[in-house]
Amino acid sequence: MSFDDFEETQVEDDYDDGVEEIKFEVDEPVIGVIVDIDHDVGPNENDVIHLARGGDLGDRVKFWSNGQIRRTIDKKGLGNGSWLAVKKTAETRTYELENDDGSTEEREYHVFDVRGE
């Protein structure tokens, strides 16, 4: 067999599965049942969390996780079928990022309140 013996398959963008992707606004929580977690995807190897909002499988959403969300999910042992509540708070913190040239810059991020069972 050679490469040309196989039929070409056209595939759509892996991130576009038709599920609404949400971006968090301050003090607007999302609550639902974890349907799936895509681990280590995208250029930064983050997770994508798929939720059935309010437990309704007909109302599915997805969002990119971050370290705060991932650590809570791991610490509580949450997975498919677990309830998850995530809210971006108004509280911010900073960290220093080292650039390739050795210089540093301060970055600000929002604190997330993450709960689950």
Image (cartoon, helix red, strand yellow):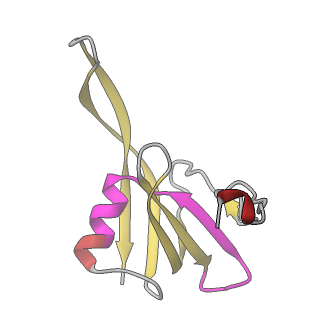
The stretch in magenta equals 54-73
Examine the rendered structure and indicate whether residue 34 appears above or below residue 111.
Answer: below
Residue visible at 74% across and 83% down? 58
Asked if residue 9 is among those painted magenta in the image, a careful observer would answer: no
Q: Is residue 23 left or right of residue 107?
A: right
Residue visible at 26% across and 78% down? 76
Q: Is residue 93 left or right of residue 80?
A: left
Examine the rendered structure and indicate whether residue 76 appears above or below residue 21.
Answer: below
Q: Is residue 58 left or right of residue 55?
A: right
List x then y, in percent, for residue 16. Answer: 71, 58
List x then y, in percent, for residue 62. Answer: 60, 64
Residue at the front extreme? 1
* Front residue of this view, candidates 42 and 113: 42
Residue visible at 33% across and 27% down? 107
List x then y, in percent, for residue 86. Answer: 45, 64
Asked if residue 58 is among those painted magenta in the image, a careful observer would answer: yes
List x then y, in percent, for residue 69. Answer: 36, 61
Looking at the rendering, which quadrant does residue 39 occupy?
A: bottom left
Q: In this view, does 61 lie to the left or right of 67?
A: right
* Front residue of this view, candidates 45 and 53: 45
* Front residue of this view, candidates 2 and 32: 2
Examine the rendered structure and indicate whether residue 76 appears above or below residue 19.
Answer: below
Which quarter of the image is occupied by the C terminus?
bottom left
* Front residue of this view, candidates 91 and 66: 66
Residue visible at 46% across and 84% down? 80
Looking at the rendering, which quadrant does residue 75 occupy?
A: bottom left
Number of numbered discs on residues: 0
Which quarter of the image is occupied by the N terminus?
bottom right
